C-alpha cells in the first residue's frame, strides 16, 4: 500500500494553555511532512484575529504551508477581503473558503447586509484576486441545507466553476460514503481533487453530537462498538483501529490524500498516520 499524503486541521487557541496545545500538536505532526495545516475560523468570525495570528505563527515557525479558513459570516465584502489580504501579507497563500455556520443563537445562515451571500460569491472574489490556492468544503452525506444529494453535488460543482482548486469533505464514518460521493461527483463532471476529511474519534459522545449537527450518517454498529469498548476500557484502541481501517480502505480505492481533523489532540492522528506508513521526515525544533 502506497502511503498517502496528509494534511491536518487545527483550531486557533483562546487561552495560554490552548496555545501550548496547538504548538504541541504542530510539534507532533509537522515531522509527518503534511501538505498543509488548516486553521479554523470561529462562527460569526469570532476567532478572526486568533485565526490570523495562529496561521501566521504556524507558517513562520514550521515553514509549512498553512490554509486559513475564511467565511462569509458577520462581515461585509470589504471586511472579508481585508482579512484575506492580511493572510496574504503574513505569507498565508492558501484559503479554505466557506459560507460558515449560522451565528450564535441563529438556526440558519443569514448574510451580512453588505456581505457575500454564499461561498460561491466568496470564491469568485478570491479568484479575481489571483493570490490564493482556494479549498472548499464538500459533503459526502449531503449538506444539511441541501434539498437533495443531486443539489449538494451541483453546488460543489458551482464552487469549482467559480475557481476552487480542491475540496475537503466533512468527516464520515464508512468508506462507502466517500467512495459513492466521489463517483457521483465524477459523473457530474467534477474533475478537481476531492480529499476525504477524517475525524479520529477521541470522544464518541462529542463526535456523535457533532455528526448529528452536520448531517453525517451514524451507523448503528458504531454505537454498540463504543458501548462495548467503554465497558472494557478500550475506546482508544477501538478509535485507532477504526480510523486506520477507514483510511486503509480509502487508500486501497485509490485515495492518495487524507485530511485529518485533529481537534488539537495529535496522538491518535499520529498513530493512525504511522499505521498507514506515513513516517516522520524531519524535526520541528523551532516551534515554541
Image (cartoon, helix red, strand yellow):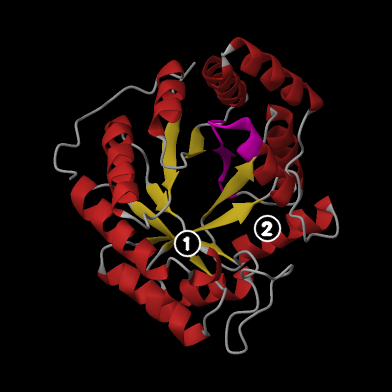
> For mark 1, does the 10 Å Cα neighbourhood hold few (<14), some (14 to 19), or many (20 or more) residues?
many
Of residues 101 and 36, the one nearer the viewer is: 101
Using the image, determine if residue 191 lies above or below residue 270: below
Q: Position of residue 249 (x, y in %)?
A: 62, 21
Query: What secondary structure is found at the residue carrying circle 2?
Result: helix
Q: Position of residue 1 (x, y in %)?
A: 49, 15
Q: Read off the residue under disc 2.
A: 156
The quarter of the picture where the C terminus appears is top left
> Which residue is situated farthest in the top direction here?
232
Give me the residue at 14% from left, 42% from top: 286
Residue 195 within the magenta-colored segment of the rendering: yes
Q: Position of residue 78 (x, y in %)?
A: 46, 86
Question: In screen coordinates, is 40 left or right of 171?
Answer: left
Question: In screen coordinates, is 91 left or right of 189?
Answer: left
Label placed on residue 41: 1
Q: Which residues are magenta?
A: 192-207
Of residues 90 and 54, the one nearer the viewer is: 54
Give me the residue at 61% from left, 67% from top: 99
Amino acid at each position: 500500500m502506497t502511503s498517502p499524503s496528509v494534511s491536518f486541521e487545527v483550531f486557533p487557541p483562546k487561552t495560554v494553555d490552548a496555545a501550548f496545545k496547538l504548538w504541541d500538536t504542530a510539534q507532533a505532526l509537522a515531522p509527518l511532512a503534511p501538505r498543509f495545516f488548516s486553521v479554523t475560523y470561529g462562527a460569526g468570525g469570532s476567532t478572526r484575529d486568533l485565526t490570523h495570528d495562529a496561521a501566521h505563527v504556524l507558517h513562520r515557525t514550521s515553514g509549512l504551508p498553512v490554509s486559513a479558513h475564511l467565511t462569509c459570516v458577520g462581515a461585509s465584502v470589504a471586511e472579508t477581503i481585508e482579512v484575506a489580504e492580511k493572510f496574504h501579507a503574513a505569507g498565508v497563500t492558501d484559503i479554505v473558503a466557506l459560507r460558515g455556520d449560522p451565528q450564535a443563537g441563529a438556526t440558519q445562515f443569514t448574510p451580512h447586509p453588505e456581505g457575500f451571500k454564499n461561498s460561491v460569491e466568496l470564491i469568485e472574489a478570491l479568484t479575481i484576486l489571483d493570490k490564493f490556492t482556494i479549498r472548499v468544503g464538500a459533503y459526502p452525506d449531503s449538506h444539511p441545507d441541501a434539498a437533495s444529494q443531486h443539489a449538494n453535488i451541483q453546488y460543489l460543482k458551482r464552487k469549482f466553476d467559480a475557481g476552487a482548486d480542491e475540496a475537503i469533505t466533512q468527516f464520515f464514518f464508512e468508506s462507502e460514503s466517500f467512495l459513492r460521493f466521489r463517483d457521483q461527483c465524477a459523473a457530474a463532471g467534477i474533475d478537481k481533487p476531492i480529499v476525504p476529511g477524517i475525524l479520529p474519534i477521541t470522544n464518541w459522545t462529542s463526535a456523535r453530537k457533532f455528526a448529528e449537527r452536520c448531517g453525517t450518517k451514524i451507523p448503528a454498529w458504531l454505537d454498540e462498538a463504543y458501548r462495548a469498548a467503554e465497558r472494557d476500557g478500550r475506546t482508544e484502541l477501538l478509535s485507532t483501529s477504526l480510523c486506520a481501517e477507514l483510511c486503509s480502505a480509502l487508500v486501497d480505492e485509490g485515495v492518495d490524500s487524507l485530511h485529518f481533523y485533529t481537534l488539537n489532540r495529535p496522538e491518535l492522528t499520529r498513530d493512525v498516520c504511522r499505521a498507514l506508513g506515513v513516517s516522520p521526515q524531519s524535526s520541528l525544533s523551532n516551534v515554541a
